[in-house]
Amino acid sequence: MPTLVFMPWCRIEKEYRVGNITVIPFKVFEKPGILDALGTCQARALLSPYKNLRGESINEAALIRYSEKEILSDLTNDEVEDIRDCLDLFCFSALARREYLCGAGSYCNADRFTFFGKTFKNDVFFSTFISRRRDGRTVDVRPLSWTSISIPIHVSESGRIDIDEVLLSALIDYRETDPNGDWPRWRNAISCFNQANTDNDAVRQQVEWVLLCCAFQTVLGAKSKDKDVASKFEQAMLPTTSLQMGSAARKPASARKNSSIRYEWMKEFYRVRGDYAHGKMDTAQCLTWQTGEHIVLATIAFPLVVRCLLSRAGKYTLGDQDQAEVDAFEGFTQIKFLEPLANQTTNMDSPWRRLVNDAWKELLDRKMEMLADGTAEQG
């Protein structure tokens, strides 16, 4: 039977090709375009139960086309799983572009990319709703007019979704070539990262912590040891100038003076994972960084690690902005960034953005000096 796959909370302005799928913007009340008249009516009916927070049916969504099939087509279980994997990369490429600690800029969470697949017969006024149970599933067939599915309150209706298309293309390229058979590991890591970034209050921070640690360990190919994860993290994310613990303002009591700040931060972050992963709701370990600080630092660091690893694999070129963020990270760990920002200039101003901008200017200054030295030598 034909199936409509869609993301009801994802409003985009253009099409995106992601591996075997195309993500297509759909405006409910526009004239037929990507679908014929009948298909448009069917799509409108299937989307009608999905409501905004005012209780009104949504007027925009993202539809999914698989390969060269029609949007309304029969799909196999394998094709649905492939759609899921591609949408994980699409979601991650948006999460990787978020702005933090400010009131403006691009921000979204993973739940904004929740997708549904609605299978229907000729009569689209009834639909089948399937819910998971621990011992199987529940199947409920009901009229669409009796059904209301509201956008979660933590999912913004209006926030702009900004996709990092260069990163997305690099991930798809790596997925399709993968000479070393590493992609299953990467797939799991990215999925864990996405699941740790729902912003859903029902998901405890301890769960997010474990998921983020799993994401780092898996993508780095590290052993389940804090020192190994920290060492591989340190080697993957290389700043222009590494900051040492000897000059650090915030440092664990057990830190070595000649170790890097990023190494010691990751070692503490991953070490605490053991408590949460083994059922403890609280940790008795001494923390240099607050729980909220650790979560933010890990969320910023993971996409940077992915970019660095893709660069090492020859699939991605680190730009000045990427390198500036890598360079700013260790300094960012040294400030109490969850406190209100003094002298905020604009809604885009944040402690993270200030450090990145400073690092970016330093990169440009070094490039100008190198260019000037080269010109002088030539003269």
Image (spheres, rainbow, N blue to C red):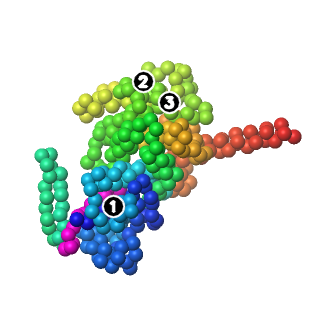
Q: Disc 3 designates what residue? A: 234
Looking at the rendered structure, which numbered label has been put on residue 137? none
Q: Residue furthest right?
A: 379
Residue 373 in view: yes
From the viewer's perspective, is the residue at label 1 or at label 3 nearer?
1
Q: Disc 2 designates what residue? A: 227
The amino acid type found where label 2 is placed reads: Lys
The amino acid type found where label 1 is placed reads: Met
- Mark 3 crowdedness (10 Å alpha carbons): few <14, some 14-19, many ≥20: many
- Mark 1 crowdedness (10 Å alpha carbons): few <14, some 14-19, many ≥20: many
Quarter of the rendering occupied by the N terminus: bottom left
The amino acid type found where label 3 is placed reads: Glu
Q: Is mark 3 on a helix, strand or loop?
A: helix
- In this picture, residue 318 sits left or right of residue 113: right
Q: Is mark 2 on a helix, strand or loop?
A: helix
- Please give the name of the residue rendered at 87% of the width and 40% of the height, measured from the top-left corner: 379
- C-alpha span from label 1 to label 3: 37 Å
Q: Is residue 120 magenta?
A: yes
Of residues 67 and 44, which is closer to you in this image?
67
Of residues 33 and 162, which is closer to you in this image?
33
Find the magenta span and give its range: 112-124
Q: Disc 1 designates what residue? A: 7
